[in-house]
Amino acid sequence: QFTGGHLLAKNSLDDLRGKNISIEQYEQICSELGFSPRWDVPIGEERFDSASTNIKLQQFGMEDINSFGYLEKLEHVDAEGAECYEEIMALRAAMPKLQVTYSVLLGNERIGCREESYKLSSEVPFNALHAGLRYLPELKELDIRAAAYGMEKEQTLYAAYPDIQFIC
């Protein structure tokens, strides 16, 4: 049977894994078949079984956010090591029930997304800290004594992140 631009055996129509099918082709196949077969969902440079409950990935773009919806059983995304923070935040906003774990690289330190309190062990460039804290919404306390920023930069942090208690 010729479906979605692919020649497929009738008995293979319920499982399209291993085939390089785009989202547009998948939508066409579903429309023609009247049901949603199992397939490999493209996200970033990777593909994931549509029945996956947990996936691990390094990078993805804003254009991939809707693709996560094709992973109907997805419960957890491990994006540890990924540095596409805007995209991670967009994914969290788009799918608030989805557990997404990641960490934010600030200088030489990685702070986990679930950290509520953290002590910097080295000097982190101020601009990196100032920009990166927005990706750590659960952080409530941060010890920045090792950074020794000085009063002006500390005041900038207080103003930008009033929900974080800074220990100076």
Image (spheres, helix red, strand yellow):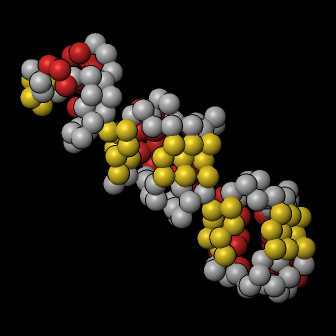
Residue 107: percent from the left, percent from the top? 64, 79
Farthest residue to the front: give it: 11
**Position above or below: 139 against 130:** above
Identified at 45% across, 49% down, the residue is: 62
Residue 115: percent from the left, percent from the top? 76, 59
Identified at 81% across, 85% down, the residue is: 146
Identified at 54% across, 55% down, the residue is: 79
* Drawn side of residue 121 relative to residue 31, left or right: right
Q: How many marks?
A: 0
Can residue 91 be seen at all in this image of the molecule?
no
Task: Give 77 or 146, whichever is nearer the viewer.
Answer: 77
* Drawn side of residue 50 relative to residue 88, left or right: left
* Drawn side of residue 94 relative to residue 113, left or right: left
Q: Quadrant of the C terminus?
A: bottom right
Can residue 106 be seen at all in this image of the molecule?
yes
Q: Quadrant of the N terminus?
A: top left
Residue 136: percent from the left, percent from the top? 71, 58
**Position above or below: 58 against 108:** above
Looking at the rendering, which quadrant does residue 103 occupy? bottom right
* Drawn side of residue 12 relative to residue 66, left or right: left
**Position above or below: 118 against 153:** above
**Position above or below: 137 against 120:** above
Residue 120: percent from the left, percent from the top? 78, 77
Looking at the rendering, which quadrant does residue 4 occupy? top left
Farthest residue to the top: give it: 34
